[in-house]
């Protein structure tokens, strides 16, 4: 798996309701999912919690100071997205964090 640049990760982001979708290819293996998580964490300068695995999904909490987002990878839905979590991180904060324009 080729490492993604910050620009590629920014360009992959799209606002979808109250989440930010990452238009990237789904990782083919658990190891590749963990590598993708590490790349996204590097891009966001965030710390990573232990992944929570389900039958067809992986979720991990990304933290940077007071900001927390949930990274979701779901193979059944064929989707990767970020969800804001907690009082200090809403969709506007998440958009700013990933470089999207603020929600109007």
Image (cartoon, rainbow, N blue to C red):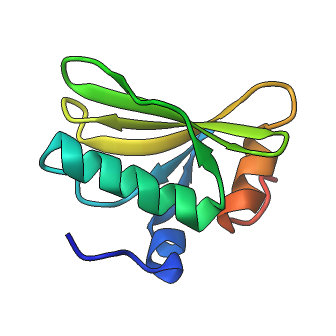
In this view, which residue lies farthest toward the top? 55
Which quadrant of the figure contains the N terminus?
Answer: bottom left
> Which residue occupies the foreground of this view, 2 or 8?
2
Compared to residue 19, the image places residue 76 above or below, namely above
What is the x, y in percent for residue 67? Answer: 78, 42
Q: How many marks?
A: 0
**Which residue is rendered at x = 44% and y = 67% of the image?**
12
Q: Which of 6/10 is in front?
A: 6
Residue 10 sits in quarter = bottom right
Closest to the observer, 9 or 62 = 62
Image side of residue 102 versus residue 13, left or right: right
Give the x, y percent position of residue 82. Answer: 54, 42
Question: Where does the image place residue 2, in percent across and percent down from the top left?
Answer: 24, 76
Question: Residue at position x 22%, y 52% from top?
Answer: 32
Q: Position of residue 81 (x, y in %)?
A: 46, 43
Q: Nearer the viewer, residue 47 or 72?
A: 47
Residue depicted at x 82% and y 53%: 104
Q: Is residue 96 left or right of residue 100?
A: right
Q: Position of 71 compared to 23: left or right?
A: right
- The residue lying furthest to the left in this view is 28
In which quarter of the view is residue 54 placed? Answer: top left
Q: Residue visible at 44% across and 62% down?
A: 39
């Amino acid at each position: 798996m080729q490492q993604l640049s910050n620009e590629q990760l920014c360009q992959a982001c799209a606002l979808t309701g109250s989440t930010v979708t990452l238009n990237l290819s789904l990782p083919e293996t658990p190891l590749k999912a963990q590598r993708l998580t590490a790349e996204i964490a590097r891009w966001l300068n965030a710390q990573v919690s232990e992944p929570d695995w389900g039958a067809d999904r992986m979720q991990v909490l990304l933290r940077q100071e007071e900001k927390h987002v949930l990274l979701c990878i779901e193979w059944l839905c064929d989707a990767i997205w970020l969800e804001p979590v907690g009082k200090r991180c809403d969709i506007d904060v998440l958009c700013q964090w990933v470089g999207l324009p603020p929600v109007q």
